[in-house]
Image: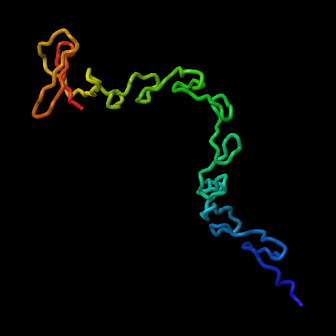
Amino acid sequence: MAYEHCNYSRDCAGNCYNYNTENPLVTLDCNGTCGGIWEKDCNGTCYDPSADLPPTTKDCNGVCGGSSTVDCNCICGGSDYHDCVGVCGGPKIYDCGGICYDPNTESPNNIPDCNGDCNGTATPDCNSVCGGDAFLDCGNNCVSPTCNAYRKEVSNSRNDSVIVTENGVKVYMIAVNAYWRKYNIM
């Protein structure tokens, strides 16, 4: 004959309950507080849900700490998003000035330059330096200015140039506005 009291226990607050048919009325949370609200995230880290988001959550694939999200077509791990007019998977994007346009059929009203300045004027030079001053000479060589060269008599032709050796290094001299400008040869 079983004793009825063997099916009973007390919860952390001292309430009596039948552990075969009932859950405790009050339990300890993961922080050890009777009746507390702290919970464990999917990694088992205890946190206060009234003050914090879980430190680690499951992504839409059920992976704890995973990064998959549901896209606008309700596909877990999908890549569709709402374009700037609200069409899921639509092609429209914002230009750098905040104007929505379709890059497949329209040109943007505002274009960032290579510095990221909206409607800026900086362009990459032949050395791929944004706003740089290197240029291609008439021999299709990329040359970079090293300094403003020295005043010297030159003809009026814009094609005056000469290669000289200076301290054992070949440099390219080009006539610009009646000044010789010196460039390293790349």
Residue visible at 24% across and 32% down in the picture: 186
Q: In front: 167, or 48?
A: 167
Q: In front: 97, or 53?
A: 97
Residue 160 against residue 101 in the figure, above or below:
above
Which residue of the protein is positioned furthest toward the bottom in this rendering?
1
User: What x and y, as percent, mark residue 137?
Assistant: 26, 22
Residue visible at 59% across and 51% down in the picture: 67
Residue visible at 63% across and 32% down in the picture: 83
**Quarter of the image where the N terminus is located:** bottom right
- On the rendered structure, is 65 left or right of 160? right
User: What x and y, as percent, mark residue 40?
Assistant: 64, 63
The answer to which quarter of the image holds residue 122 is: top left
User: What x and y, as percent, mark residue 181?
Assistant: 19, 21
- On the rendered structure, is 154 left or right of 68? left
Q: In front: 136, or 82?
A: 136
Which residue of the protein is positioned furthest toward the front in this rendering?
139
User: What x and y, as percent, mark residue 43?
Assistant: 60, 63
Q: How many marks?
A: 0
